[in-house]
Amino acid sequence: MPIYSIIQKSQLEGALRLDAEYYQPEYLALDSKIKSQKSKLLSEVGEIAYGITPAGGIFEEVGIPFVRSQNFSDVLVDTSNLVFCSEKFHNQNKKSDIKPGDILFAAVGATIGELAIVQDEITKGNINQNIARIRITEKNIDPYFVGLFFASRAGQLQIERFVTGNAQPYLNSEQIGSFIIPVFDIKKQNEIAKYFQEIQKQTKFSISLYSQAENLLLEELGLKDFENEDNLFAIVNLSEVKNARRIDAEYFQPKYEKIISKIKNPAFAKTSAGEQNTRLLGDLVSIKKGVEPGAEEYQEEGKLFIRVSSLSKQGITDKDQQYLSEKLYKELKNDFEPKIGEVLLTKDATPGIAYVLKEPLEGIVAGGVLRLKVKEDIDAEYLALCINSMVGQAQAERDAGGSVIAHWKPEQIKNILIPILPEKIQQKIAELVRQSHEARKRAKELLESAKQKVENLIEK
């Protein structure tokens, strides 16, 4: 049945849009619903600013947090992989500075429509040119409510409406300023805003627990305060070159040998409960590779296709997600659908990201991801943490380095060393990881509840 809308000529002139996509019934219904109650334009209640990237895209190792759209995660700024800008650059670009309560929109490209609300721990920072910062200036509008409104379906539909029909996805300040927000009683706004405070609390708790687990592992291995010295050269034997089948200098950096010696040498790595030993990963797990059906099979909806870009150590993200048809999923599921308890491990592009699947999932694993099934008496969460920590990352970096696009070969992955700590220590580490994931899960549930609360208010 054809879908159409009847539009007045005056509406066309006001919107400056002629494409049919802009006038889809779903968009018009939402527009009418919000305007039927008290509402305001975003430009009436806030300021909009765009950032800029430092010359040459060169960042600092320390300094002022510099936020990019890839740092957005479940309406928060993920601080785990931030880059930094200098104090001088920040002061020269104060118009795009950020502070707690600011709303950040991804305004360009594939991540357009994603957003983050700056949390309390980021007291100051800056943004690049692909982000629009909205700072709410009206006293009777709660910024956290506005951020959660735009994270909800109603807010996302407004963004989608403006983006649809454009050759190059982009949101300019005029479009963002024309977004409509419902203006509820301030008490109702504050009720929604409280969800954000709890979301950031649970997320912070999750990060703290995971950090405790990682620190415990490194302490037991004698790697807690490991410092790498920058060496300009290393002396290696010809036999080492032949065994490694590598001649690039990166592979033989002394830092890798120092870390590995800590892992495997009992003289350097004693635990509080006795000496640990090491095992090859290939002895601990069976490995299955994913599949590449081809980009032509990707769909906007359907069954999950779990690629490297959609996997993190916290789980499977919604970023840049692709889907497969029901038909193709049924053809591939017996061989390529992951099972609960398996460790999903990236081997390409960003090798060394490991996550233990905790719930049933209908989806297919891509060729850049491996499925590790534990076959020995070792805790899967402990194993994944070892890979995500300095222990695994150093080995992944060494093996996959030296290429334009990193590739970690299954034969290399089988030979990485895993320290086998006493069972009690493993269990303690694994329990901290599980608690961390539970806290993050609660944060996600709170976000969904907040979105639903916003939807309910708009419907009423």
Image: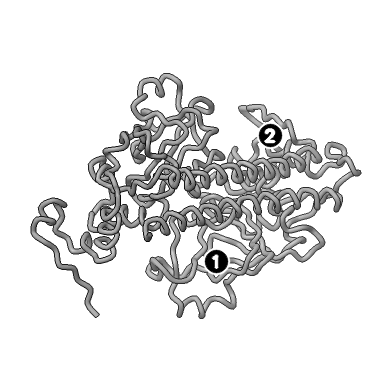
Look at the picture and state if 254 lies above or below 183: above
Q: Earlier in the sequence, mark 2 or mark 1?
A: 2
Q: Under tag 2, what secondary structure?
A: helix
Q: Nearer the viewer, mark 2 or mark 1?
A: 1
Locate residue 320, reporting x and y percent: 43, 56
Quadrant housing the C terminus: bottom left
- The residue at 40%/33% (across/down) is 57
Type of amino acid at the residue the image marks with label 2: Pro
Mark seen at residue 254? 2
Q: Quadrant of residue 86?
A: top left
Locate residue 187, reporting x and y percent: 45, 44
The answer to whether 348 appears left or right of 105 in the picture is right
Q: Quadrant of residue 17?
A: bottom left
Look at the picture and state if 164 lies above or below 336: above
Q: Under tag 1, what secondary structure?
A: strand
- The residue at 37%/69% (across/down) is 296
Mark seen at residue 16? none
Mark seen at residue 365? 1
- The residue at 69%/44% (across/down) is 209
3D distance between C-alphas at marks 2 and 1: 35 Å
